[in-house]
Image: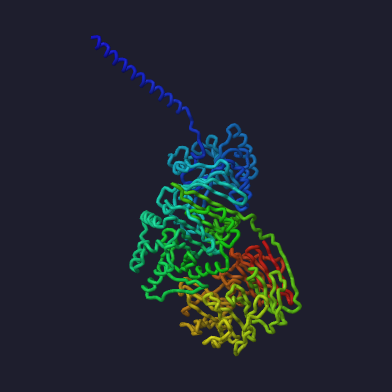
Amino acid sequence: MYLSWKLEKYKQLKRAAIFITLGLILFVACVIWIYQSAQVKKVTPWDLIGKDAALVFELPNAMLTKQKLGTLKSINSLAILDGNFNKIINSKLVQNGTAFLSIHATARDDFGFLFFTEVNPSVKELYLNELIQSLQTELTLKKRLYNGVEIHELLLKGKPSFSFAFIDDIFILSRSSFLLEGALRLRSAEDQDLFKIQNALLFKLPTLQSDEGNIYFNVSNLLESTHLFLQPRSGKTGIPIGGSSLADLKLIDNQVLLNGFVINSEVNLLTLFEGQQPQPFDMEELISNRVAAIAHFGVSDIKKWFVDQQKLIKSDGVTSTDSLEQELLRLSVKVDALRKSIGNQFANCYISDGESSVSIIKLSDDAGTISVFDELSFKLSEQKKDSLYVEDYAGYQIKLIDYRNFLHQLFYPLAPVAEQTFFVQVGQYLILSESVESVKLFIDDMDAENTWGKTVEWNRFLSTSLRESNVNLFFDGKLASLFLRNQFNAKWKNFFDSTQFVGIDKGSLQLSRLETNYYLNASLQFSERLENRGNSNLLTITNNFGSTITRRPTTVKSHVSKDIEVVIEDSLKNLYLLSKDLKVQWKEKIGDRILGDVDQVDFFSNGKLQYFFITEKGIHIIDRLGRYVDGFPRQVEHKNNMEYSAVVDYDRSRRYRYLMTENKGNLLLTDKNGNLLEGWNPLVLNGKMIAGARHYRILGKDYFIAVNQNGIVYLMNRRGEIAKGFPLNLEIRPGGELSVTVGNTLSSTYFTVVSKDGLKVQFGLDGQIRRKEVLLKKASSSQFSLVKSVGEDSFVFLRIDPSKIGILQSDGKTLFEVENSGSSNWQLTYLDNRLKERFYCLYDQQQNFSYYYDSKGRLLLRQPLESTQLPTLYYDEKLKSLSIYNVLDSSVSLVSIKK
């Protein structure tokens, strides 16, 4: 009995303990519930920023950051920083504390921002009233409720300018009511709609406390937003990259610096560099100064890269890359050998014209002297039963891989599409392009030391970047702006022009693979000052030579100083070499009048340049010290008076030919020593020519072309044989010169001429008319001529009307018009600088005045210059100055215009 009683008592006590424990747990839970229910969740700006944000700026001290940005004039000129916005940012309401700025797409071609900052509740009403009073001098205030929150709308002339609201102590400002309302809706939205949730991993990364702030990127949203600025035909970026990024913002002198991390959580372009060690960038000696941007990629394990490429191809659902492997198998070219020949670097260079690109591959040590690329070139030509394309140029051999999208398939998705691929090997590198002319351009610029590696500014900038990385984007801000501007839609093109955003001088973005993420390093270097076309510095130097100057000055290059010099001739048949500031270097009596142009040759192939020209007595070659080269002057038999001359260098081997045109139209061609060549002694053509005969090398083939004043076109080969389809009767009387547009194929290459009455005619190498177009006339008596630029890389049409002089671009659209002072005898010369800015000189031969204009037809000089010859223009890229060499009777003047 006792034991039973004890057992029952124990059970009762155990039940009581359980009930007490449960009671305590319930009590604590109730207390916690009551406490939490009594608490109001503190709202932060991150609770109001949606997942659609492309960028979010976190600024610990918004005022200080804004002041530093203000020192960068290009950024300070942005429309977002207008007067009323400045008033709000400068007000006491938002001066202290951290601010946030999020960027969102708001329309098909527009974006907006949301500005957030936390306000001290004790002074909120006071400072708000002060702000409203300061704004109401220009704006009117309107209030409305949305989701229980009061929105203040500031109206400028009845139209919304800004809207702002408060959520608790968070001040929210935007130009867009749509964005502001969206932020207010996020208070009750799901967490998944927030930027901080969608990009949660970013908030686990470390940040600096001593910088100007942090920038958070959603890479996919950012790339998607780029289509807001582009013309519809430009489409979206199509760059297969995603993830998110956090970077510290630093402003130092004239640079904006970003350092941080990129988190990649998808299969995309960055997948290709997982497990790859960062590599050096060492291609600068090859990159032309005409390049606007370069995308460079470095890999340490090319075999792994191609394995990862297959994963990306499968993820993207791409099948087009299979055809290359199949073709290689058919040709018995080993795929593995091709891939093994590739070294640790690949790059795409984008030329400033926005249409051309050049790729560079660094070959591996296993590539061998006869590369797999050579083997593929040979076997493709053999399969198509074409002759093997090999063009000797400047000591290099240019070859062709006649296979569509070769690089695009090999390096998917890094390389652009192309119909064909020309390539040349330079040391351990291959230079490749769809256009053989682009390959030649790179070779020319390497020989002329016109590359990034020979440029002080680029060397200085590159020295501040990461030495090794996996993905690099470097760009020249001025050149990149040229083709970017052409891609912008009308709205953003106007914004681009009005803000002078080309104040960005150079920029870089670099990604380096770390253990699980990518290290981000980016830099924007701004010009120290914005160019102001309203303020020009003029410098004038004049030298009188005592005798009338009989030909316009010719600018030549000094092989000693690499600077320009000037050649002139006077009425006493004296030839002068002048320094660029008109100091006489030497004077040589040549006893005859120079005909045609003064050209330069490297007669001895030693880098020292001589001057070539012709007179009625023959060929002259004089060195830089004023001494004749042995064997010259050299007489050449001819029946009629000489009129024009040109130096021909077929493959830039310095095995020169001298082409001369008689005033009756006959052509003569000699070898380097002045001996007439068979078939050219002379080549008899009928009729006076509109200009001197010219030589062009197009896709490895040599062509000579001449057009007479009756519109008969002659096209010849090196032996002087007339090409099939020629002579071609254009049935017009041409005005001015002839221009050639070299395509990527012979069939896409064409010539352009214009008749004196305004009919533009284009014809091909096959002798077929491609197009005829009537240019716009202003009067029945309008006279037209085609004028090529000083560098012959563009052309315009000159239209002379009784009351107006018009300059028309190559498509016939009017660039600008100026008043005609009553003359019917006008000449035009113009040049393009590297930024495609143009400078025009119109010369009135009747009244002996010359007028100078910029690209938009604005006068460069307030008063015309008196001139007795067509002036010569030269632009100094280093000094950013235009030089005008002007002749007035016996005097030569140099007028320098520096912006």
Foreground pick, 897 / 492 = 897
Quadrant for the C terminus, please.
Answer: bottom right
Q: Please tell me which residue lies in front, 437 or 390.
A: 390
* Location of residue 226 in the rendering, given as x and y in whole percent from the top left corner: 49, 54
> In the displayed structure, does residue 252 sit left or right of residue 36?
right
Quarter of the image for residue 611 reads bottom right
In this rendering, is residue 256 above or below 784?
Answer: above
Q: Position of residue 237 (x, y in %)?
A: 46, 56
Q: Is residue 655 above or below residue 218?
A: below
Q: Which residue is drawn at 40% across and 25% down?
A: 29
Can I make out residue 710 in this image? yes
In the displayed structure, does residue 360 sit left or right of residue 628? Answer: left
Total residue callouts: 0
Figure colour scheme: rainbow
Most foreground residue, 18 or 785? 18
Pick the residue in front: 821 or 768.
768
Q: Position of residue 388 (x, y in %)?
A: 42, 74
Q: Where is residue 826 in the image (x, y as percent from the top left)?
A: 65, 75
Q: Quadrant of the N terminus?
A: top left
Left or right: 181 as drawn, with respect to 337: right
Q: Residue furthest left?
A: 1
Q: Residue furthest bottom?
A: 639
Instruction: Let me know if residue 176 appears in the view.
Output: no
